[in-house]
């Protein structure tokens, strides 16, 4: 579900990582520079089991709980960065996911869903990093924002369909509201890439964004790996 690479387990638009990134713009440069960092989460036993339909309602709910912590941190950072002329452009209201996650948690756990909101150590580390860097600079904010929301618009759409089929949920978005957006994902992705291409960052600032996206990938992979260990999810035979 993180960032925009493959359309299989965790998120992406497909395509290749090659080409002249300098000519194509920063969106292509960022995608190419982080291509090799994306694979760890795709091999997570938890994510593989999720998209293969081998997890039940409780195991899926465990991911929704952890994602709520991540998006709460990101969207709190977005509020804090509302006055930043660069960061604020990326905070498109339709992309915000916290309310959708809360609707899914209410569906899965009922009105006492907040009693289930215990972060794993991996999630705590992830959200601590978001809080540290996403309000320190526009580039730090965008790095974490890009990694999550572009993934939701890309491979996250595949995951949502798989969860809906596996758990028999999804009527009126019950249980899978997180994966649903008001408009077409491609339109959001195109607009987001245009924002990346026009962000007023010099080479050093772009390099810093790329480096932080790599950190975000590692944190995202650690989150799902931790869930897999906690839930004793085994690789497919």
Image (tube, helix red, strand yellow):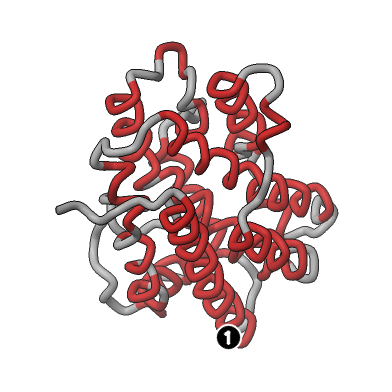
Which element type, helix, strand or loop, lies under badge 1?
Answer: helix
Q: Closest to the observer: 15 or 102?
A: 102
Q: Mark 1 points at which residue?
A: 203
Q: Where is residue 119 in the image (x, y as percent from the top left)?
A: 66, 50
Q: Say if 82 sits above or below 17 in the image.
A: above
Q: Closest to the observer: 70 or 134?
A: 70
Q: Which residue is drawn at 76% across and 69% down?
A: 132
Q: Where is residue 164 in the image (x, y as percent from the top left)?
A: 34, 25
The image quarter in which residue 115 lies:
top right
Label 1 crowd bin: few (<14), some (14–19), many (20+), radius 10 Å = few
Q: Which residue lies furthest to the top in this view?
A: 172
Q: Say if 52 sits above or below 19 in the image.
A: above
Q: Position of residue 146 (x, y in %)?
A: 54, 58
The image quarter in which residue 131 lies:
bottom right
91 relative to 107 in the view: left or right: right
Q: Which residue is drawn at 33% across and 19% down?
A: 168
Q: Residue at x 35, y 51 (%)?
A: 233
Numbered label tally? 1
């Amino acid at each position: 579900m993180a960032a925009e690479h493959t359309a299989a387990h965790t998120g992406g638009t497909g395509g290749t990582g090659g080409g002249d990134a300098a000519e194509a713009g920063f969106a292509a440069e960022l995608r190419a520079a982080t291509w090799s960092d994306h694979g760890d989460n795709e091999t997570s036993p938890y994510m593989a089991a999720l998209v293969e339909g081998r997890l039940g309602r409780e195991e899926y709910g465990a991911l929704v709980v952890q994602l709520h912590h991540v998006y709460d941190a990101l969207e709190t950072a977005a509020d804090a960065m509302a006055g930043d002329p660069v960061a604020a452009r990326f905070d498109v209201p339709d992309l915000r996911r916290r309310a959708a996650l809360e609707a899914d948690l209410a569906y899965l756990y009922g009105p006492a869903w907040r009693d289930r909101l215990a972060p794993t150590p991996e999630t705590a580390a992830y959200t601590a990093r978001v809080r540290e860097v996403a309000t320190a600079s526009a580039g730090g904010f965008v790095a974490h924002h890009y990694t999550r929301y572009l993934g939701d618009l890309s491979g996250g759409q595949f995951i949502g369909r798989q969860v809906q089929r596996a758990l028999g949920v999804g009527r009126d978005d019950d249980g899978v509201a997180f994966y649903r957006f008001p408009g077409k994902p491609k339109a959001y992705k195109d607009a987001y890439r245009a924002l990346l291409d026009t962000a007023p960052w010099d080479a050093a600032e772009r390099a810093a964004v790329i480096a932080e996206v790599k950190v975000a990938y590692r944190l995202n992979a650690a989150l799902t790996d931790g869930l897999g260990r906690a839930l004793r999810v085994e690789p497919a035979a």
